[in-house]
Amino acid sequence: MVKSVHSPVDLIGGGLAGSEAAWQLARRGHRVRLFEMRPVKNTPAHQSDKLAELVCSNSFRGADLKNAVGLLKEEMRLLDSLILRAADRHRIPGGGALVMDREGFSQEVTTAILNEPNIEVVRQEVSSLEPWLKNHKDIEKPLLIATGPLTSDSLAQELAALTGQDSLYFYDSIAPIVAADSIDRTKVFRASRYDKGTPDYLNCPLNREEYEALVAALQQAEKMPTKDFEAPKYFEACLPIEVLAERGVRSLSFGPMKPVGLIDPNTGRRPYAVVQLRQDDLHASLYNLVGFQTRMKYPDQVRIFRTIPGLENAEFVRLGSMHRNTFINAPKVLTPDLELKDHPGIFLAGQMIGVEGYVESAAMGLYAGLVISQRLRAKNLQPPPANTALGALVRHLTAASTRGFQPMNVNFGLFELPMGMQRKEQRGMVSELALECMKNFAEENSLGTVHVEDHFPQMVSS
Ligand SMILES: Cc1cc2nc3c(=O)[nH]c(=O)nc-3n(C[C@H](O)[C@H](O)[C@H](O)COP(=O)(O)OP(=O)(O)OC[C@H]3O[C@@H](n4cnc5c(N)ncnc54)[C@H](O)[C@@H]3O)c2cc1C
């Protein structure tokens, strides 16, 4: 337990949101004490002591501006995001997506934070909020909690008590990773759907018989048991592969295994279904099975995934697994500043406030850092306009219905879209306007005045 609070800003959690928030605060001249429990105590998914570790996929999803997450990333670049700078620097081929070498990315963020003189990293689990609660009326000492979907149990209990509600749970599942040299290259082919971007995916083609046998095996596989305290509520975009298979024989061939836009050069025809493999590291020595997050037992995973053409002799360097996801009912308990309504001075950010995804979590860390910085300068930061991706997310978190509130990826459904236009044209226009508004927002609030190269010359020079 932390005995005393000395530093101007205390921050709990050195993940994507916490690292970004710490950076934004430090580069604006605020001292930050960042508590990260790893490696002293681990989570069920993290594997290293690095800050901003990517726990599953190594993708920040679509890079295109006609895509809401592409727009959010561009807005974050305008606000000098550390997470985006590190991602851009460690980009590896990934078709139309921003895909990173996971080791290089996390190391870059860790080095930046450790080299930043305004940040002190304390490797310690925070299990009680008592030291801050005594001080919470004192805005000189704000606290930001960004402990993510795998917040340690003791802190989760404290938060549940503080917010007056029980935490909500659902499952996310990790997709398996195979060694590249164990893939049979005579059976798989390299392509991106509809030849979009560069042909960065390895595609394992299945005929109808192979596909139906795979679905049957997934349906019958042995699953990990569910713990009593966890109700199996899944986020639709991250369903375990076997749950999708249980929904019907064709649900996979219309979902992650859809063969559209792909021709197998060995047959000259579109396969009945495909399993796509995505590069996972800089040297292309590892590939993950796209969309194959799972909670099947390990022996069944190996047995079943080796029936996929090309993976008969696959070496699995990581198998899929399932994890709890903790998040709060943001519209009920948070102000638009991401501050607890009943506990001024305590801010929350990241996945735990009900956004979904690496980029969205980092974006909320960025925004919380800006809000706290302005507050410490006795200024108020109005949320970014709701026609920006960042503003649309903040509005969703604080204005959505409190009943059945669910985590959300950024998407154009959160925007007010101009009517009577083609989809592509409409999105292009929305993105253009959003970036213009974000530039104005940064200028009006003097957010772009600190030069990153002063703090991180090696990033800028490369
Ligand atoms: C298993 C799993 C797989 C996921 N896969 C993906 C994916 O493929 N793509 C995607 O976009 N999103 C994915 N997500 C969702 C989400 O984007 C990530 O969890 C993301 O890392 C969230 O960022 P964060 O900063 O909120 O939390 P995290 O990155 O998890 O950071 C929280 C940090 O807080 C620390 N911490 C926790 N409790 C304490 C404590 N009491 N004291 C001190 N430190 C503490 C943790 O060690 C961790 O470093 C996944 C989530 C899970 C759980």
Image: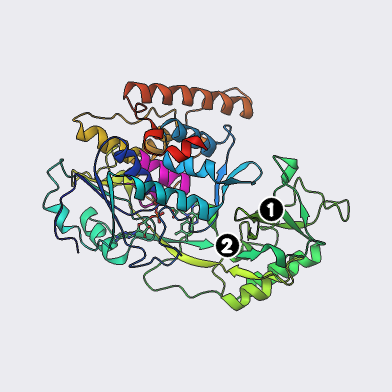
How many C-alpha atoms fall within 10 Å of the one at disc 1: few (<14), some, or many (≥20)?
few
Q: Give, as a three-letter code, the residue at label 1.
A: Phe
Could you tell me if residue 353 is visible in this image?
Answer: no
What SS does tag 1 mark?
A: loop
Identify the residue at horizontal 29%, vertical 60% (top origin): 166
Q: Which mark is residue 369?
A: none
Tag 2 residue:
175
In front here: 10 or 424?
10
44 vs 264: above or below: below
Tag 1 residue:
254
In front here: 43 or 7?
7
Could you tell me if residue 351 is visible in this image?
Answer: yes
What SS does tag 2 mark?
A: loop
Locate residue 82, reporting x and y percent. 42, 41
User: In the figure, is residue 326 to the left or right of 319?
Assistant: left
Locate residue 249, reporting x and y percent. 70, 63
Q: What stretch is highlighted in magenta?
A: 349-366
Which one is earlier in the sequence, the residue at label 1 or at label 2? 2
> Overall secondary structure of the magenta stretch?
helix
In front here: 309 or 243?
309
Q: Give, as a three-letter code, the residue at label 2.
A: Ala
Was residue 353 drawn as part of the magenta stretch in this picture?
Answer: yes
